[in-house]
């Protein structure tokens, strides 16, 4: 056996594995010596999770509400107390003056107001009928709709409390159940999104930059004049970022599990395996970009404009794909992040197994093979 | 001992043409170049910036393909047998191309591993060079001085004991002392049997080569041993000096008997159109007939071709 190796070494001159190993070690030197970039690479997922988790949330929580209470009757007071005691709303002001409300909306102090007319109490007692008005600031329609729904539910609850024994001839009780995410937490949606975004940034952009940097600084000239196989240059560039990305996935999962209370319902192993698949897709894409560009600037531009923006827009993480016009829905199929987003949501939140996501997995696998194949094919063995 | 077979050709370049298309403009970098280099010799490629030296080096090292013509390096076709070729050549590009964020030691070891060898294995070849940079071996390459960088780059190009070494302008931007040391090192490497192809814009370095080729605008103007090149010059050449050198230069440029005049150190050198030409010189000027050096010959060759 030993003799065989010696023989092979003499024939193929450079020992393949050793050469590859040294190349990877060199890549790690580059990464670890650029402290600032390393810090950003490892810190970015934490910052993003925290920003999305606590700042950019559209959950209804302690929203300020203005109440124009012209009634001041018993029922009206009880209703206001009920709204106030819920964790969704916080009473900002209560007054009789309707003009006051307009000011509050313009100032942006409140996003929703409840108007209780002066005849609210008497008409409930006398006619079994009361009228209320909800006014919402619809500059952000999604938020306005959500707030209105929450407030309506509270009012309906209140109605039931008023006369629990009322004999209404027909009554349909609708019980809505929010599957997988009963508390309607935004984190369930954005954790998979942030994972896709971070992995794409780290893998695609960083690998593209690292290969192009060698071209720009002239290192590639010596590498090409040496016997190393271009495929090895490409793969050696990808390995360190694969490892860094696995660290990043771990950070994201730990933070979302312990800080944001997002459950991991499916198999952790499957989740990691799918993530690694997506990492490889992103790495392949990064290498493909690097093979076609000669300057770090254009590599960065292409990674950001051609990959990052579509990922944010077409992955379904911020804008629901179902609501898009057909051409955009077709485009979204070519965005790897869309499939990864579906996979992570399915595995992490719904807890499904590979059986139900084999299609998405297959698509990502094909994309990975395509990107790597193209990158290797396009990688030049000469300078021009 | 190095030249066992003095007729063996390390490099054969036959009618090589290379041009670049930049937008709609086509620039010819190399125009029908042919030459041969004897194995084990030190071959100098002398020419101004933009003459096509780097293009030629890239073709010889299989980094670029020629548009026309054929190139054999160490008996291998650069177009088809580049894989084998790349194991045998050492290349040091004109621009410092090592990893600035790796230390001296890491750079050398990385390049050794690239060629499947180790630092220890070929240490004796680079020992003389390595000793000079060894005190800084843990310093990052980006923080070295120009001369140190060149020595390191040469170490890295040599670490796999190449049969042919390509050095593209290794002494550009290096101080005079380091330049001298560098050329002494090349002589030692030649003694080891390594064929060395070196390019330089400094004409005075030409005399240190076994053979030189003068290249300008993609054409080789002359190729021979430095000695033969000087001997082949058959024009009359004078050195002239006066208190007002600038005025003197302008005056001589107008003289119809003068072919070229150019500043050379503290003198102006004048090449006459005819051997027996007579020129008028200002009273204060002192003129003296000289034997040409290699720079005079090159300047004459370059000016004659340019016009």
Image (cartoon, coloured by chain):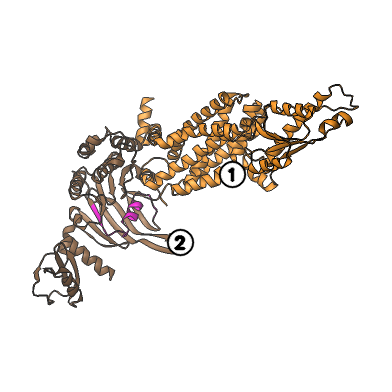
Chain colours: A orange, B brown
Mark 1 to mark 2 CA distance (whole Å): 32 Å
- Along the viewing direction, whichever of A131 and A309 lies nearer the viewer: A131
Instruction: Tell me the quarter of the picture where residue A369 sits.
Output: top right
Instruction: Tell me the quarter of the picture where residue B287 sits.
Output: bottom left
Residue at 39%, 62% (x, y): give it.
B27
Residue position marked by numbered label 2 in the rendering: B23
At label 2, counting other C-alpha atoms closer than 10 Å, the crowd grade (few under 14, some 14-19, many 20 or more) is few
Task: Please provide the residue range marked out in magenta.
Answer: B43-65
Instruction: Please state which of the two labelled residues, at mark 1 or mark 2, is closer to the viewer.
Output: 1
- Give the structural element (helix, strand or loop) at label 1: helix
Residue position marked by numbered label 1 in the rendering: A310
- Along the viewing direction, whichever of A254 and B66 lies nearer the viewer: A254
**Residue A164 place in picture, x, y as percent:** 84, 22
Please state if B197 lies on the left or on the right of B23 as rendered: left
In the displayed orientation, state which residue is furthest to the top.
Answer: A165
Query: Is any atom of residue B3 visible in this view?
Result: no
- Along the viewing direction, whichever of A4 and A200 lies nearer the viewer: A200
- Give the structural element (helix, strand or loop) at label 2: loop
Q: Label 1: chain?
A: A
**Residue A238 place in picture, x, y as percent:** 46, 36
Q: Label 2: chain?
A: B
- A329 drawn magenta: no
Residue at 24%, 54% (x, y): give it.
B44
- Along the viewing direction, whichever of B58 and A243 lies nearer the viewer: A243
């Amino acid at each position: 056996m030993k003799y065989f190796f010696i023989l092979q070494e003499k024939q193929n001159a450079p020992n393949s594995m050793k050469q590859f190993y040294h190349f990877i070690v060199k890549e790690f030197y580059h990464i670890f010596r650029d402290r600032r970039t390393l810090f950003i690479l490892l810190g970015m997922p934490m910052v993003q999770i925290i920003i999305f988790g606590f700042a950019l949330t559209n959950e209804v929580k302690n929203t300020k509400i203005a109440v124009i209470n012209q009634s001041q009757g018993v029922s009206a007071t009880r209703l206001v107390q009920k709204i106030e005691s819920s964790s969704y709303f916080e009473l900002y002001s209560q007054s009789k003056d309707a003009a006051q409300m307009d000011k509050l909306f313009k100032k942006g102090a409140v996003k929703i107001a409840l108007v209780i007319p002066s005849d609210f109490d008497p008409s409930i007692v006398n006619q079994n009928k009361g009228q209320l008005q909800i006014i919402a600031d619809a500059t952000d329609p999604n938020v306005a709709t959500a707030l209105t729904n929450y407030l309506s539910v509270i009012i309906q609850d209140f109605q039931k409390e008023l006369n629990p024994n009322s004999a209404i001839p027909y009554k349909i009780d609708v019980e809505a159940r929010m599957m997988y995410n009963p508390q309607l937490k935004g984190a369930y949606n954005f954790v998979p999104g942030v994972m896709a975004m971070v992995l794409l940034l780290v893998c695609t952009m960083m690998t593209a930059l690292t290969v192009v940097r060698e071209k720009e600084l002239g290192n590639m000239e010596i590498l090409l004049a040496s016997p190393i196989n271009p495929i090895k240059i490409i793969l050696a560039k990808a390995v360190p970022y694969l490892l860094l990305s696995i660290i990043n996935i771990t950070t994201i999962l730990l933070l979302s599990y312990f800080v944001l209370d997002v459950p991991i319902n499916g198999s952790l192993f499957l989740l990691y395996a799918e993530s690694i698949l997506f990492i490889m897709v992103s790495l392949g894409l990064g290498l493909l970009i690097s093979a076609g560009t000669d300057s770090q600037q254009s590599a960065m531009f292409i990674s950001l404009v051609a990959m990052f923006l579509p990922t944010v827009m077409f992955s379904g993480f911020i804008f629901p794909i179902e609501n898009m016009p057909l051409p955009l829905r077709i485009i979204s199929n070519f965005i790897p992040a869309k499939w990864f987003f579906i996979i992570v949501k399915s595995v992490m939140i719904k807890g499904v197994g590979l059986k139900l996501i084999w299609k998405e997995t297959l698509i990502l696998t094909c994309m990975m093979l395509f990107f790597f194949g193209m990158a290797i094919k396009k990688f030049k063995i000469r300078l021009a | 001992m190095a030249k066992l077979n003095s007729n063996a050709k390390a490099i054969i370049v036959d009618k090589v043409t290379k041009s670049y298309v930049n937008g709609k403009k086509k620039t010819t970098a190399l125009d029908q170049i042919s030459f041969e280099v004897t194995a084990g010799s030190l071959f100098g490629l002398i020419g101004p910036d933009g003459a096509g030296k780097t293009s030629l080096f890239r073709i010889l090292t299989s980094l670029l393909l020629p548009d026309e013509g054929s190139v054999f390096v160490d008996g291998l076709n650069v177009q088809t047998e580049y894989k084998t070729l790349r194991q045998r050549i050492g290349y040091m590009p004109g621009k410092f191309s090592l990893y600035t964020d790796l230390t001296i030691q890491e750079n050398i070891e990385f390049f050794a591993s690239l060629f499947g060898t180790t630092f220890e294995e070929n240490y004796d070849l680079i020992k003389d060079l390595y000793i000079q940079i060894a005190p800084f071996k843990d310093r990052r390459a980006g923080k070295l001085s120009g001369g140190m960088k060149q020595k390191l780059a040469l170490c890295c190009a040599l670490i796999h004991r190449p049969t042919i070494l390509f050095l593209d302008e290794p002494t550009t931007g290096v101080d005079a002392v380091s330049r001298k040391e560098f050329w002494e090192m090349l002589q030692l490497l030649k003694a080891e049997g390594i064929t060395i192809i070196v390019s330089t814009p400094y004409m005075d370095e030409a005399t240190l080569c076994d053979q030189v080729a003068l290249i300008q605008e993609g054409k080789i103007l002359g190729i021979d041993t430095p000695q033969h090149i000087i001997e082949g010059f058959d024009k009359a050449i004078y050195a002239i000096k006066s208190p007002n050198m600038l005025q003197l230069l302008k005056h001589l440029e107008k003289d119809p008997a003068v072919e070229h005049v150019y500043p050379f150190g503290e003198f102006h050198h004048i090449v006459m159109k005819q051997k027996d030409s007579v020129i008028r010189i200002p009273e204060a000027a002192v003129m003296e007939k000289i034997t040409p050096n290699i720079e005079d010959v090159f300047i004459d060759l370059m000016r004659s071709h340019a016009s």
